[in-house]
Amino acid sequence: MLRALSALIACCVILPAWSDEGMWTFQQPPLAAIKAKYGVELTPEWLDRVRTATVRLSNCTASIVSPDGLILTNHHCAEGCLAEHSSKTESLLERGFAAADRAHELRCGTQVADVLMQMEEVTAKVGAATRGLDDKAANEARKKKLTELEQACEDASRAAGAPLKCESVDLYEGGQYYLYKYKRYDDVRLVFAPEEDIAAFGGDPDNFQFPRWDLDFSLLRAYEDGKPAHTPNRLRINFSGPDAGQLVFVSGHPGTTDRQLTIAQLETQRDIDLPEVLLRAAELRGRYIQFGKSGPEAERIVQEPLNSLENGIKVRRKLLDALHDDQQLARKRREEGQLRARVAADAKLAKSIGDPWQRIEAAQRIDRAISLPYQFLESGAGFNSRLFRYARELVRAAAERPKANAERLREYTDAALPRLEQQLSAPVPVYPELEALTLSFGLERMREWLGPDDLVVRRLLSEESPDQLAARLIANTKLADPAVRMRLWHADSQTLIAAHDPMLELALRVDPDARAVRRRYEDEVEAPVQAASEKIARARFAVLGTSVYPDANFTLRLNYGTVQGWDEDGVAVPPFTHLERLFERATGSEPFLVPERWLAVRSQLDPDIKFNLSTTNDIVGGNSGSPVIDAHGEIVGLAFDGNIHSIAGTYWFDPKDNRAVAVHPAIILEALSKVYGAKSILEELRAN
């Protein structure tokens, strides 16, 4: 019966229509499809070399390009490090950075570099821990089991003399669980970054557009025991780049896709999540811009957070547009309806999974009801401040550490604590005037959206205005000093209370309310959705097995495509841009300003050299910095963006218009050799 049902659903359910679509795991790449379409056979050796030369940064992807730990990624992936080493009077974002030698490479205090070494499936172990339990109990048991598996994995690797960072990975919405085992480098240093004016030429107006002229690359280096890491597995850069129509691969860590969500979940995003975030972000953007206009120092310190915010606004705006695409949403409805109908037609399967779609619909009603308190209290939108985030981490670590490891919040397990400690100890600049702006804004919006009679709002703002409260907290807290944070890191809750730090007092004061709404979310939304999603995954597996790819979740994936342009309203968009057009588009003012260093050597540069390129690869945020690789395993591009159509790739992939955008390696060579005179870097890159 089940075999017959599988065949029937396979005929009727609309399958992925585009053979180049997909963010495939390295344990299940579509080797046969690639060989059938392109005649290219990827060997296990090719896959292993690419996997162990691809790097996950804390916010992006990168690749190892020398045996001495040199890492290639995007400029915008290094913005945090550049800002960390900037000040009100000097901005490395503005002037760029080139280390004179290895002794002068700059430590990126909050950055890590992870290389995926092993993958172990643990689906059966997780299933055994949750079998027979109701949704709430299963959710708790699942988290405990994952914590136990992660800790046992790390303990075993440490005992073997090769410590690994072990993380549980949920694939196919709970259909599979893996342990991913990483080699972690927590000493990452900045080697080179160009000026932002050339790295992000065109700024926000050009963001998610093509043609482009962005030198969006930087170089980092992984260190181990105070020395450059030994990295024998690396990728060679082919500075000639790819040809039009050539098959290329992207190895990277796409952040999040929602292609397997139910219609009810997509509607929650469309009606609640995205509009709420966009409204707040748009107003904060205006405040950032006005703040930046108050003087050159303000402009420097707001530059990095404004860039990030503007990017997020554009992404979410286009995501909202995508969810209002009636044709695409109707297609998703048909696919879901067909699968539900076929499940209902089989008594045995229907009995085993029930109606998980209905359970998700019920959970979404609760999700909508608690969305605002969850966002403002637990997610911290009401306390938009780096100093508050430090305070919350200290408060929660003090409360969670005395508990048994498996009983803690997942972000405070023994496996997670070293990363938190690294972030707390990093000497990241804190600007009081910017903190006051963001914290007072968060408090104002919380009062507006939760209402002045909300218990938390009344408790905090019955005697002080948002501006007054924010100013008092920031003026009197000591948490901007990393030495103070480290003295409090191992403190218990009573010691934190006795410190009489106003930001700690705020975190302590609101933590019970935040935990309460988190608990309700976990029990009434997360738990039933997780249980129902696993059952939907079971139905999908009955039809397709693993012949389809799982949604992205910032784990390593491989995808394939070709170097192609597209037609935009009947106008052909070529797949390459060239250097000369950069100077033609320059206006002399930001964001279309070419740095003086480039203007000074313009006559020495090849005007026909390729600058950026577009491909059909299926990528999303998180793939920034991913190597674009040819069939020989050589880097022929550096992914840094997508066109405006690619944003909808969170929900579905359209090969007609969806394009990835990459830096062409030829312009990297031209820049390093003729503009920046980076002889030692070029020697290291060419020594591969």
Image: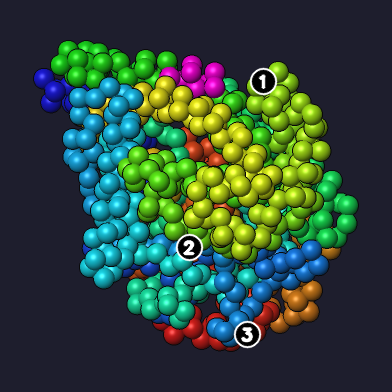
Could you say where residue 390 lies in the image, as x and y percent from the top left?
60, 50
Which amino acid type is marked by label 3? Ala
- 114 w.r.t. 16: above or below: below
Q: Is residue 531 left or right of residue 287?
A: left
Could you tell me if the residues under marks 2 and 1 are in contact, i.e. CB atoms within 8 Å? Answer: no
Name the N-terminal-most of marks 2 and 3: 3
Residue 624 in view of the camera: no
Image point (44%, 85%), residue name: 687
Viewer-closest of 349 and 174: 174
Secondary structure of the residue carrying tag 3 is: loop
Which disc is residue 112 wearing?
Answer: 2
Secondary structure of the residue carrying tag 2 is: loop
Which amino acid type is marked by label 2? Val
Could you tell me if the residues under marks 2 and 3 are in contact, i.e. CB atoms within 8 Å? Answer: no
Q: Quadrant of the N terminus?
A: top left
Which amino acid type is marked by label 1? Asp
Residue 129 in view of the camera: yes
Looking at this view, name the residue that lies furthest to the right.
Answer: 294
Viewer-closest of 289 and 195: 289
Cα gap from disc 2 to disc 1, whole angstroms:
40 Å
Cα gap from disc 3 to disc 1, whole angstroms:
56 Å
Q: Is residue 73 left or right of residue 203?
A: left
Identify the residue under disc 1: 454
Q: Which residues are magenta?
A: 363-370
Cα gap from disc 2 to disc 3, whole angstroms:
23 Å
Could you say where residue 38 lies in the image, as x and y percent from the top left?
32, 55
Identify the residue under disc 3: 100
